[in-house]
Amino acid sequence: MVRQGKAWLAGAALAAIAACSKAPDGPAAADLKLASQLLADKNQAWWKGHALPSPGEPLKIKIADVGDWSSMNYSPPGTPVLPFVIARVLHAGSPILKDTPFAGRTVAFVDVRSRSDFYVEHIPGSRNVPIREIHKIPDDLDRSSIMVVTGELYPHHEVISRMRAAGFNTLYCLEGGFKAWKARGYPIEGRSDAVEYRRLMEAEREPTPGGASNDLLGLGPLALRSLIDAGADMKIIFVGDEETFAAGHIQGSTRVGLKEVEAAFRDVPKDRLIAVYCGCCQGRAGGYSEIAARQLRRLGYTKVLHLDGHLGGWREAGYPVASSSSK
């Protein structure tokens, strides 16, 4: 099985982390030069209150590779992307930060990847707040800090929104996420206890109270609403019967019966963005939509998102539900 294979490979991955060479003590000269140029650029977000001055171009929707479901790979609208060279000098506390808007500010790195991934390797000094636990942001994180949030690529909409709601006003997404940081040869650290790593992996497979099981990671109601509001080119699919669909569904969604999934998607491009949900289980894990999402992935669709919490979670978030014959 895939899960067993991943666990079996854990030993090799952990050994590689344990054996990695010592990271350099400070940023390389080339990074310092580029960082200095960026820091002096008055058009950058840090000279504009650490925020984007305007929405800019329409959101370009991209999706992570299959299996990389812990975060979507575009930055939330309105949130600046922090160049990795700036992140590096911030992490090192470099003197070149003097006379810039970063001077004198505390900087915190928050990693929203799974606990098992964080355990194996992470940015030194970063804090782990897994995306599924973002509602439990630690109280000891200084709300006045500059927060550099990183995931597989760019953090989820819901992560940023919840952090803002928790009182964090200066937020950046790390350019390229943790993978880009690691690829640059920047400092990382981790642990190599394979027993603990496997324990964390098993815990992450347990179903969550309000959504699909963690081995099929999806998106929350806020993230789906953000995609809809951004005008994403996306098919929203309700999986279930006509009666349940008529009783309540997300505006703009299309009903597909569970046995009709393959036929309904016969002419749909394999790279089409698809969001799947159902209304039968009122937010519990599993349901028709999870079965349909797995079927679509087996059929080769690479951009399938599952709505955690289903229609029940959407209702609880306070978002509108259409009924009767409205689609």
Image (spheres, grey):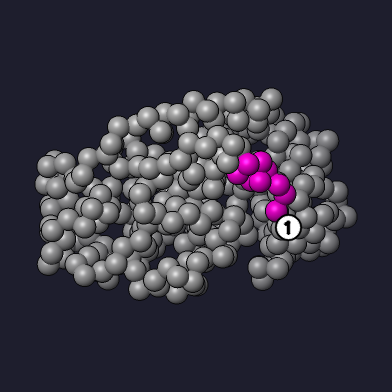
Q: Position of residue 270 (x, y in %)?
A: 59, 31
The reply to whether the magenta stretch includes residue 203 is yes
The reply to whether the magenta stretch includes residue 263 is no
| Residue depicted at x 77% and y 47% | 286
Tell whether 77 sits left or right of 195. left
- Nearest the eye: 5 or 184: 5
- Nearest the eye: 14 or 168: 14
Asked whether residue 94 is in view, the answer is yes
| Residue depicted at x 45% and y 74% | 167
* Quadrant for the C terminus in the image: bottom right
Tell whether 85 sits left or right of 33. right
Residue 132 vs 199, above or below: the answer is below
Q: Amino acid at mark 1?
A: Pro
Q: Position of residue 75 (x, y in %)?
A: 42, 53
Name the residue carrying label 1.
209
| Residue depicted at x 83% and y 61% | 247
Q: Position of residue 125 (x, y in %)?
A: 36, 54
- Nearest the eye: 304 or 189: 189
Tell whether 43 sits left or right of 172. left
User: SS class of the residue under badge 1?
Assistant: loop
Residue 108: quadrant of the picture: bottom left
- Nearest the eye: 25 or 178: 25
Q: What is the magenta range?
A: 199-208
- Report the number of discs: 1
Q: Position of residue 253 (x, y in %)?
A: 69, 52
| Residue depicted at x 25% and y 49% | 88
Asked whether residue 231 is in view, the answer is no
What secondary structure is the magenta-colored segment mainly? Answer: helix
* Quadrant for the N terminus in the image: top right
